[in-house]
Image (tube, rainbow, N blue to C red):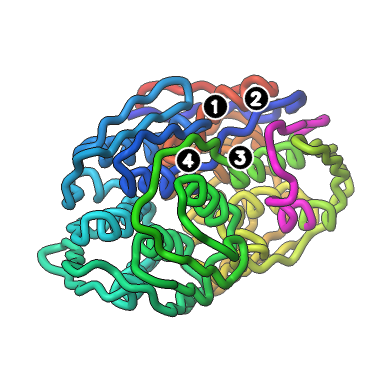
Amino acid sequence: MEKLIVHGGATLKGRVNISGSKNSSLPILAATLLTKDECTIRRVPDLSDTNYMTQILAEVGADVERASGVVVVKAENIKSEAPYDLVRKMRASICVLGPLTGRLRHAVVSLPGGCVIGDRPVDLHLRGMEALGAEVKVDAGNVIVSAPKGLKGATINMLGKQGSTVLGTDNVMMAAVLAKGTTIIEGAAAEPEVEDLANFLKKMGAKIEGAGTNRIVIEGVKELNGCDHTVIADRIEAGTFLVAGAMLGDGVTIKRVNADHLRAVLDALRKCGFAIETTKDSITIHPNGTAKGFDLTTLPYPGFPTDMQAQFCALACAIPDVSTITETIFPQRFMHVAEMKRMGANIDLQGATARIRGGAKLSGAPVMASDLRASAALVLAAMKAEGRTEINRLYHIDRGYEHLDDKLSSLGAQLERVKA
């Protein structure tokens, strides 16, 4: 096990390349199970989560080769059961359920694990499979889905209590591409990662319209072929580096990004008073010593992303003003608050709303990461704090950020990874 030692007070300046999207890579890798042909996926980030997914693909019988961000999968002969030992490590592993059911008409997938950030049930995934004509049951911790006569198109609403489900939309879309007839997903997630998956499936020969909106129409086809696809940029990694630039930067530019995918984040930063310049594939943020506080509410895309809530908590601590953040997607996703308060942050948590009085001096302290995005927030706060901060449970960061410490070091941050 490793930990990160951060020495606060450094100024960040320069350029950094953003990696491919974790939340696109995982379902796209799973979708390679839909064909016997070879698929090449480029710009796959080197993360523990993508490593787990490639291991799952290999475990169900696919041939997988990986080198320098390129993953080649040939799933010619596969089996229908995804093993507990791998699935339990990552919530996104549930997205093999749709491809296995669509192609093999049978799937056994253990109930998944992942970040502990509140209740994230798979009931919408299962409801979608049932609507397509599959029989679904949960037994001994396994989801068992059977459709011996194949899946049939249907109209399915994927809205849940907290809005649309991204992985649920992904799963139904992947299952429906090989179903008989037409499937309409109402209340579909509109995130760029869903659209990226749809574009990959279309390259494979799927017939999909409306991806990127709340209504997706899929006309089932008999079979799919292999293809070559490049994953979109990770908008959450991009947003994290923009916040780092806002808190500590003297002109930070992120490269290989799509600013359109970051509109809510850019709007929020601009309202604080940060000057931002965009080009076709880059975003530059400039510091502002008189930045203003903000009031944010997390919402499904294109609203402000829940995956940026923790990072903006860190930003609010650095702005000498009062800010509030209300979490509507995962109301319990504030476990970073207690650790940031150990560093001197003035945060009052009332239900699903955090009220942050910024400007207080932060001091380095031993802290513990509780989930992926909380880890990133602690790194941001630690770089702002005086003295030395020790961040434990570094494996959370490695789930979703490719070489975060190396990239920050290239901008001037003073941090090092050591054995715990």
Q: Nearer the viewer, mark 1 or mark 4?
A: 4
Instruction: Please tell me which residue is depicted at 83% across the width and 55% down the height of the picture.
Output: 272
Q: Secondary structure under badge 4? A: helix
Quadrant of the frame with the C terminus: top left
Q: Position of residue 191 (x, y in %)?
A: 58, 59
Residue under numbered circle 1:
405
Residue under numbered circle 3:
233
Circles 3 and 4: CB atoms closer than 8 Å: no
Q: Which amino acid is tagged 3?
A: Ala
| Residue 163 inside the magenta-drawn segment | no
Between the residue at mark 3 and the residue at mark 1, the CA separation in whole angstroms equals 19 Å
Tell me the crowding category of disc 1: few under 14, some 14 to 19, or many 20 or more residues within 10 angstroms, Cα based. Answer: many
Q: Secondary structure under badge 3? A: loop
Q: Earlier in the sequence, mark 3 or mark 1?
A: 3
Residue under numbered circle 2:
413
Residue 298 occupies quadrant? bottom right
Q: Earlier in the sequence, mark 1 or mark 2?
A: 1
| 224 relative to 300, above or below | above
Q: Which amino acid is tagged 2?
A: Ala
Residue under numbered circle 4:
400
**Residue 373 shows in the view:** no
Q: Position of residue 104 (x, y in %)?
A: 21, 55
Q: Earlier in the sequence, mark 4 or mark 2?
A: 4
Between the residue at mark 1 and the residue at mark 2, the CA separation in whole angstroms equals 8 Å
Q: Which residues are magenta?
A: 249-267
Q: Earlier in the sequence, mark 1 or mark 4?
A: 4
